Image (cartoon, helix red, strand yellow):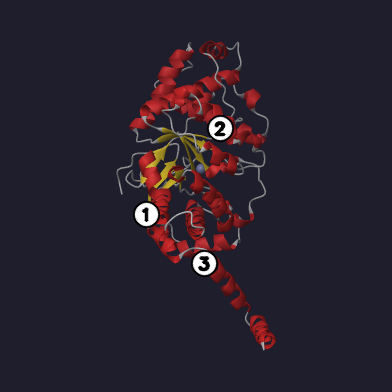
Amino acid sequence: MAGKLQEVVNKLKLAFPALLLLSAACRRESQVDPRIASEIANIQAIDNHAHPVRPTSAGEAPDTEFDALPVDNLEAQSDPARVRSGAPEVIEAHQALGMKARPPTEVLDKLGIGIMVANRVAMGSGLPPERFLWVPYADALMYPLLNDAMIHNPDQKAFFALEEKLLKRYYSESGIAARPATLDEYLTKVVQGTLERHKQGGAIAEKFEMAYLRPLDISNPTKSQAEAAWSGRGDYKALQDYIFRFIATECGRLGMAVHFHSNAGSGSYFNIAGVNPMLLEPLLDDPSLRRTNFVFLHGGWPYTRELTALLTKPNAYLDFSNQDLYMYPAALAQIIREWLEFVPEKVLFATDAYPYSKDLGWEESGYIAVKTGREALGIALTGMLRDGEISPGRASEIARMVMRDNARRLYRVKQQ
Ligand SMILES: [Zn+2]
């Protein structure tokens, strides 16, 4: 009898391949507790990291300030399968968002994002401050000398040219015409001046894309070592490290966090070994930097387990932006669950919405990341609930913490 039934089912499946797909979809859905899924879907999120593009009017040049190092300058890499043109996720994003260009606030409404933390060189019209918080870039300040010796591939050639251009802008905004004679003068007039201007402009953090330029091993040089390099007689890396520590200390004083790009990045030359967050452990352990909060953007992939351990340091935070674009929900859920089982109050939701290409704009990449991130969080919390690690009440609380409340506390956000 059972054999007969199986035969009928098999025949049906042959006749209706769609049934197979449907049953696979049902299995996937059941991984998330329906109550948790609906709670997560209804939270107006704070997106900890993204690159919204500013709309420009006819005749105005297109926006290029969504990144200090735009990726269209990189040599092509082998893109992850999920974001290739024609991938089901990309097609779904286009269908959901439609063809017409929407104002950025409307995109946020569509994605269920209350506030987006915009990592941009500058803000501007179309990105209102009640919906978009600003995180500018501080890398350029670390490279005030000739950078030729640091360039080892075509991508870095493009990056350093962009950083040198941005440093020129910081000089001119600081009212300084040429490189000052002393390091002290550079630190107070250009570095401190720029950070204070950013803070006054509404910045909640400074972003470092350091791993695109050099490894993250930041030492603790003396001032005289840094000054020797400033006057052309010493080690340039010592000067960079000294300036970084100055910036990190100032960020703590000004109440701004320090954001690190912390995963394997874009481009075919990205130094994956150099982005290992363990390289930053001495900084996290430095008593003089304990007033500064460090946020590991993109959750350190592939070093996600290293970050689980680092998350126990009082001033370490992370988000899972970009992983929710490149990874499928089940795989991301495993990573998120490990973090939530350790330090749930320092795990932040984020998208890294970015204008990757004509086919994958910041709206589409944001859509995929929001959907994947919400689903992965749902799978992680459902697993913890079913394994008896947390109560239903605690699952709701952690959902709100990750989607919104942790970021609200970290940046002292009053809105929402
Ligand atoms: Zn980013």
Query: How many numbered marks are there?
Result: 3
Front position among marks 2 and 1: 1
Front position among marks 1 and 3: 3
The residue type indicated by label 1 comes to: Gln
Answer few, some or many: residues within 10 Å of disc 3's Cα (few below 14, many 20 plus, some between 14 and 19): some
Q: Position of residue 386 (x, y in %)?
A: 50, 60
Chain-order first, disc 2 or disc 1: 1
Q: Is residue 30 left or right of residue 256?
A: right
Residue 55: numbered disc? none
Q: Residue at x 68, y 33 (%)?
A: 153
As displayed, is residue 254 above or below residue 351? above
Residue 44: numbered disc? 1
Q: Position of residue 158 (x, y in %)?
A: 60, 34
Q: Residue at x 39, y 60 (%)?
A: 39
Report if residue 352 is visible in the image: no
Circle 3 residue: 29
Report if residue 217 is visible in the image: yes
The residue type indicated by label 2 comes to: Met
Question: Which residue is the extreme one toward the front?
Answer: 388
The residue type indicated by label 3 comes to: Glu
Q: Position of residue 213 (x, y in %)?
A: 59, 31
